[in-house]
Amino acid sequence: MAEHPIHNLMKISMESLKKMVDVDTIVGNPLKTDRGDTIIPVSKVSFGFGAGGSEFESERKSTSNDNAPFGGGSGGGVSITPIAFLVVNESGVELKHIEERTSLYERLLDQAPKFINNIVNEFDKSGSKSSDKNE
């Protein structure tokens, strides 16, 4: 069975969206500063996609399995908004927001690096305490 024409419309649109929205779009490539800090841009990506079509009745009468005339279209949109920068240096990891955070998700994301640093510090402390006891 031959592919329906809408298949090609959707395939081309989805391939184009895939090229635009990848991991490097959301979490950018790290940049090194002269002071040795590493800065990683973080963006919010939103996208939408739609496709549709219709087959029309043919004026010619046919007994074969010819496809009816087809008309269709597809479209999509992408919004990429920079929201923050991860700053990694010798004092730890810090998330610097570009604008005021309002959603719970953004506030939790802001606290994640501090939380991870605290956990790592606690493991370091507990490891040094246990080795002190053995001596």
Image (spheres, rainbow, N blue to C red):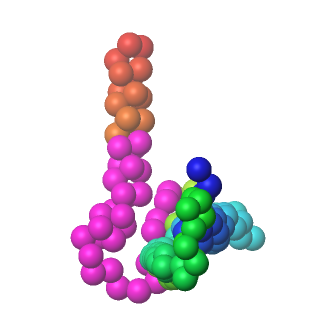
For the C terminus, the quadrant is top left
Q: In this rendering, would 127 be left or right of 60?
A: left
Query: In this view of the protein, can residue 35 be seen by the observer?
Result: no
Task: Estimate the x, y position of residue 114 in percent, counting from the top left.
Answer: 37, 58
Q: Nearer the viewer, residue 15 or 122?
A: 15
Q: Nearer the viewer, residue 82 or 6?
A: 6
Circle count:
0
Q: Magenta region's main secondary structure?
A: helix
Magenta-tinted stretch:
92-121
Q: Would you identify the image quadrant in which residue 73 lies? A: bottom right
Tell which residue pokes out farthest to the top in this image. 134
Q: In this rendering, would 32 be left or right of 22?
A: right
The residue located at (38%, 13%) in the rendering is 134
The residue located at (35%, 43%) in the rendering is 119
Q: Would you identify the image quadrant in which residue 20 lies? A: bottom right
- Please say if 105 is above or below 2: below
The residue located at (41%, 57%) in the rendering is 113
Task: Estimate the x, y position of residue 56 in percent, counting from the top left.
Answer: 49, 80
The answer to whether residue 98 is magenta is yes
Q: Nearer the viewer, residue 116 or 100?
A: 100
Task: Estimate the x, y position of residue 18 in percent, counting from the top left.
Answer: 60, 65
Task: Estimate the x, y position of residue 45 in percent, counting from the top left.
Answer: 48, 74
Tell which residue pokes out farthest to the right in this image. 34
Q: Nearer the viewer, residue 51 or 85?
A: 51
The answer to whether residue 28 is magenta is no
Query: In this view of the protein, can residue 6 be seen by the observer?
Result: yes
